[in-house]
Image (cartoon, rainbow, N blue to C red):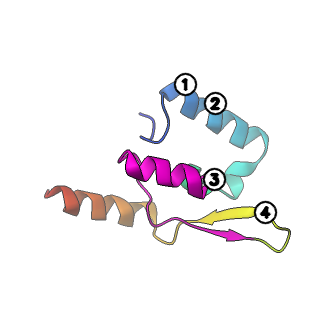
């Protein structure tokens, strides 16, 4: 199953393929490869699962995302919020 911020499984698989080919997967997960503007869109649509992600500008002037919480901690918080 694809993450809710992707429109389809095919779109997510394409991101995975490109991440693998560019070795991006070693530095980023899909949430930290996001952008602030796309994150805002997904938050408004209730499709963002990592609202804790933050973005910084590197010394090379590139945008880099970070997710402070481990994914299992995020899952635990989402389950608690859902009342399970």
Q: Are marks 3 and 4 in contact (CB under 8 Å)?
A: no
Name the residue carrying label 2: 14
Q: Are marks 2 and 1 in contact (CB under 8 Å)?
A: yes
Crowding at mark 4 (Cα within 10 Å: few <14, some 14-19, many 20+): few
Name the residue carrying label 4: 62
Name the residue carrying label 3: 33
Separation (CA) of disc 2 from disc 1: 6 Å
Image side of residue 6 versus residue 13, left or right: left
Separation (CA) of disc 1 from disc 3: 18 Å
The residue shown at (70%, 55%) is: 26
Dot 3 or dot 2: first in sequence order is 2
> What is the secondary structure assignment of the residue under circle 4?
loop
The residue shown at (37%, 66%) is: 73
Name the residue carrying label 1: 10
59 relative to 27, above or below:
below
Which one is closest to the eye, mark 4 or mark 2?
Answer: 4
34 relative to 55, above or below:
above
Separation (CA) of disc 4 from disc 2: 23 Å
Q: Quadrant of residue 75?
A: bottom left
Q: Are marks 1 and 3 in contact (CB under 8 Å)?
A: no
- Quarter of the picture containing the N terminus is top left
Which residues, given as a range, are shown in magenta? 33-57
Percent coordinates x, y for residue 16 in the rendering: 63, 38
């Amino acid at each position: 199953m694809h993450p809710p911020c992707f429109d389809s499984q095919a779109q997510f698989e394409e991101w995975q393929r490109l991440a693998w080919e560019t070795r991006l997967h070693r530095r980023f997960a899909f949430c930290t490869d996001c952008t602030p503007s796309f994150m805002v869109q997904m938050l408004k649509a209730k499709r963002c699962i990592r609202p804790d992600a933050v973005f910084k500008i590197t010394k090379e002037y590139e945008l880099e995302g970070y997710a402070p919480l481990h994914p299992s901690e995020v899952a635990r918080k989402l389950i608690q919020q859902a009342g399970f």
